[in-house]
Image: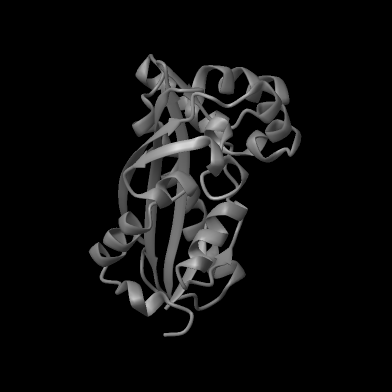
Amino acid sequence: MRVCLASTSPARLMLLRQAGIEPIALSPAVDEDAVAAAASTERGAALPPEELVLLLARAKAAEVAHRIHDEHPGFDGIVIGGDSMFAIGGQVHGKPYTPEAARERWQQMRGATGILHSGHSVFRVSPGAEPVEATAVAEASVTFADDVTDAELEAYIGTGEPLHVAGAFTVDSLGGAFITRVEGDPSTVVGMSLSTLRRLARELGVVWTDLWATA
């Protein structure tokens, strides 16, 4: 039973490897901004974060699931797509990309609690059959230390780590020292909830332990 990760996120790839899975990683050909904009236009308003992360996770997983046989003939297994956004103080944040944006967010996050929304889409893909999908959204609350100094913040931003992750923080790397509490599946904050993925795989008739590289 093979696994394909519809993402090139180093954090998601490492998370699956730590869980005993050695996936193929394919970059989905999806314009996320365009998908989100089209959905907002159709709705007449911006989608709430729990809907948006699921929409984007599904778009990425579906794109890869429908072309995987072209790149990996005979693929038999699951394709996993995910997307994450962080909501705090009534605002929703993806990746900050710039030091200025990361600094502004951390000024707001110190001593506060936000919600990390993580969308999951899993497709069961096998030769000669149409892909079948299962989806879910997982959430985890994250509380940040209230005594993070400006010097610590500048040093953290200087590493570049917070620029390319949802919410401008990590829990499993340098940013972990600035987080005081996580409520929910901790892996959700890394990028995907492993317990949610296991449940979705089971809905598709896949036994999680069969996905282990050593199985």
Q: Residue at point 63% right, 24% down?
A: 149
Q: Residue at point 33% right, 44% down?
A: 138
- Give x and y (percent) for residue 14: 56, 61
State the image quarter where residue 200 is shown: bottom left
- Give x and y (percent) for residue 168: 58, 32
Q: Is residue 128 above or below residue 132?
A: below
**Image-based side of 70 in relation to 83, left or right:** right
Q: Residue at point 45% right, 44% down?
A: 189
Q: In the displayed image of the protein, which residue is found farthest to the right? A: 158
Q: In the displayed image of the protein, which residue is found farthest to the bottom? A: 215
Using the image as rendered, state which of residue 69 and residue 28 is in the foreground: 28
Q: Split into 4 quadrants, where in the image is the N terminus?
A: bottom left
Using the image as rendered, state which of residue 104 and residue 156 is in the foreground: 156
Q: Split into 4 quadrants, where in the image is the C terminus?
A: bottom left
Q: How many marks?
A: 0
- Give x and y (percent) for residue 92: 46, 23
Q: Is residue 8 visible?
A: no
Q: Is residue 8 above or below residue 157?
A: below
